[in-house]
Image (cartoon, rainbow, N blue to C red):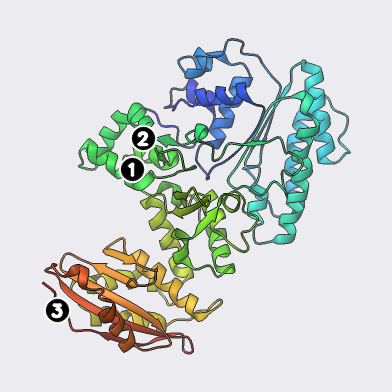
């Protein structure tokens, strides 16, 4: 089997025999039931391939679709003029770079349709190109926009430039409504959803299918599709990694499955980029995470001083989740739309969602990426702190790992953003979440529950954290609240540890380990 690594051209995939997961039934549903659509999906999720498939369909290239679902539905195969705007292939440094990219596309279209309006604003030229394409061919025009939001995302830390990009694109995309009589179909894709009051305020006939159940799997791979299309490949993957085929499926699910885009669909979506690369190389790696660093997401988390432990507990309304316009107050919608978080639960009564990491690839990659941003800057700290800490935990040495944790805060140069309490909490969240990939770590945040629980095959550790109090008070709370009671019948050695953090010194100034004992 040939895997289309880096190939987003539908015609090439079909003509050269690459694997293709048939999405044409959903494509036909869109084209036959409506005219204006918008889809938000994370990067490298197949949006460009979907646009390329639509382009071949509206070109009337019937032979490319032989054997696919749409071949049983379509009978006319009409050829339409197509204007395909791809904003994904450029770095946008200033206003002139966006204008240059729009101009590049406009010049190409004007050359085809002989327009005489090159001295006008981009939106005026776009209008006349659409009109000319319709008048010259007698067929209504198809508009395909790939990564509509790329310029604004690149300017996410530069509000004046982002505003300039937004204003330019708002006028440009607004042309679609004024050209409605000339347009057969329009489809815009992107990673994020800037609110309709900003970019798409003049395009109120755009149907957003990003969270509609009917289109959950329009991009990505479902478990059903994984078994139907790639069973032989997974057998080869398993053999190369000394696994059974069933273990290969389980590893793929753990690493790359788990995306949900609405509360109704029960089958998760696999990241197609990671799955295809894994099957092609027959090696498990974090392919999706390695191809893009979430620096702009970390920028927003730190800018808002967001409490990291709330990423997987805070409830968000549908309106909040559907726009990143509030990212300066709450970065979670941006994390969700970028693919670093996904829907985990839905509260129908309050119309709210709780988010979580979709899979191991994203969780481990993201936490590791956060580590140097939320910890003191000490040379080589990120390479040895966690392993040495874990080794102390595994061998039952709480004194050893507490000395390491105290030194972790005591050495190095760092800047505390916002309240010192939040710095302490965020640092510990990252530290213990990362440690949790090697031992069983839970962080509890609700009132009345212990703060941190660590378990190994031989030891249990209960940690209680205090701020500007004492380690003795923390230890006493463990006793008073009976945090050890659930382990009454457990034969492992249990340690209780009280920790106090001082906001004055920004250090762990007091810690105390209770006497290790077997509860059973």
Q: Is residue 318 left or right of residue 344?
A: right
Measure the alpha-carbon separation of dots 2 and 1: 8 Å
Comparing marks 3 and 1, which lies closer to the viewer? 3
Look at the image and tell me in which quarter the C terminus lies. Answer: bottom left
Q: Residue at x 74, y 21 (%)?
A: 140
Look at the numbered discs 2 and 1 and tell me whether their residues touch, using CB distance below 8 Å: yes
Residue 142 percent coordinates (x, y): 69, 26
Total numbered labels? 3
Residue 271: x percent and y percent? 43, 42
Q: Which residue is mark 3?
A: 517
**Which residue is at 24% across, 79% downward?**
496
| Secondary structure at numbered mark 2 | helix
The Cα atoms of the two marked residues, 3 and 1, are separated by 39 Å
Say above or below: 116 vs 389: above
Residue tagged 1: 253
Q: Secondary structure at mark 3?
A: strand
**Quadrant in which the N terminus appears:** top left
Q: Quadrant of residue 265?
A: top left
Q: Dot 2, crowdedness within 10 Å: few (<14), some or many (≥20)?
A: some
Q: Mark 2 highlights which residue?
A: 223
Lower position in the chain sequence, tag 2 or tag 1: 2
| Residue 25 seen in render | yes
Q: Is 131 in front, or is 421?
A: 421
């Amino acid at each position: 089997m040939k895997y289309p690594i880096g190939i987003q051209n539908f015609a090439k995939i079909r003509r050269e025999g690459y694997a293709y997961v048939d999405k044409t039934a959903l494509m036909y549903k869109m084209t036959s039931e409506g005219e204006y659509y918008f889809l938000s999906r994370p990067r490298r999720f197949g949006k460009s391939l979907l646009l390329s498939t639509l382009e071949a369909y509206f070109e009337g290239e019937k032979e490319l679709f032989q054997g696919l679902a749409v071949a049983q539905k379509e009978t006319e195969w009409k050829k339409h003029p197509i204007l395909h705007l791809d904003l994904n292939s450029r770095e946008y440094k200033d206003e002139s770079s966006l204008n240059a990219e729009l101009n590049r596309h406009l010049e190409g279209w004007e050359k085809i349709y002989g327009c005489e309006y090159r001295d006008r604003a981009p939106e005026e030229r776009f209008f006349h190109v659409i009109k000319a394409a319709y008048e010259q061919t007698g067929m209504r025009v198809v508009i395909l926009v790939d990564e509509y939001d790329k310029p604004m995302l690149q300017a996410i830390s530069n509000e004046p430039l982002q505003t300039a990009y937004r204003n330019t694109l708002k006028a440009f995309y607004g042309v679609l409504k004024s050209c409605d009589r000339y347009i057969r179909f329009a489809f815009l894709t992107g990673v994020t959803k800037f609110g309709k009051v900003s970019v798409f305020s003049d395009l109120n006939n755009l149907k957003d299918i990003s969270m509609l159940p009917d289109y959950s799997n329009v991009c990505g791979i479902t478990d059903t599709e994984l078994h139907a299309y790639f069973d032989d490949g997974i057998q080869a993957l398993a053999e190369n990694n000394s696994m059974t085929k069933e273990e290969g499926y389980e590893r793929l699910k753990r690493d790359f499955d788990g995306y949900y885009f609405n509360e109704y669909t029960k089958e998760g979506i696999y990241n197609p980029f990671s799955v295809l690369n894994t099957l092609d190389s027959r090696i498990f790696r974090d392919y999706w995470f390695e191809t893009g660093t979430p620096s702009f997401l970390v920028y927003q988390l730190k800018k808002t001083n967001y409490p990291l432990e709330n990423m997987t507990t805070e409830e968000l309304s549908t309106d909040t989740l559907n726009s990143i316009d509030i990212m300066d107050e709450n970065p979670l919608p941006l994390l969700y739309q970028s693919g670093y978080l996904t829907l985990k639960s839905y509260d129908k009564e309050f119309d709210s969602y709780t988010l979580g990491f979709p899979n191991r690839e994203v969780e481990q990659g993201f936490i590791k990426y956060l580590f140097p941003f939320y910890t003191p800057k000490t040379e080589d700290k990120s390479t040895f702190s966690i392993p040495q800490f874990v080794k102390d935990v595994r061998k039952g040495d709480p004194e050893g790992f507490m000395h390491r944790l105290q030194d972790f805060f005591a050495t190095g140069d760092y800047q505390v953003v916002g309240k010192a309490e939040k710095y302490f909490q965020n640092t510990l969240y990252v530290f213990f979440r990362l440690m949790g990939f090697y031992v069983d770590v839970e962080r509890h945040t609700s009132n009345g529950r212990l703060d941190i629980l660590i378990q190994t095959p031989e030891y249990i550790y209960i940690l209680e954290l205090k701020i500007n109090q004492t380690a003795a008070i923390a230890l006493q709370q463990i006793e008073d609240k009976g945090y050890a009671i659930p382990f009454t019948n457990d034969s492992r050695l249990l340690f209780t540890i009280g920790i106090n953090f001082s906001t004055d010194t920004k250090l762990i100034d007091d810690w105390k380990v209770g006497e290790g004992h077997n509860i059973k």
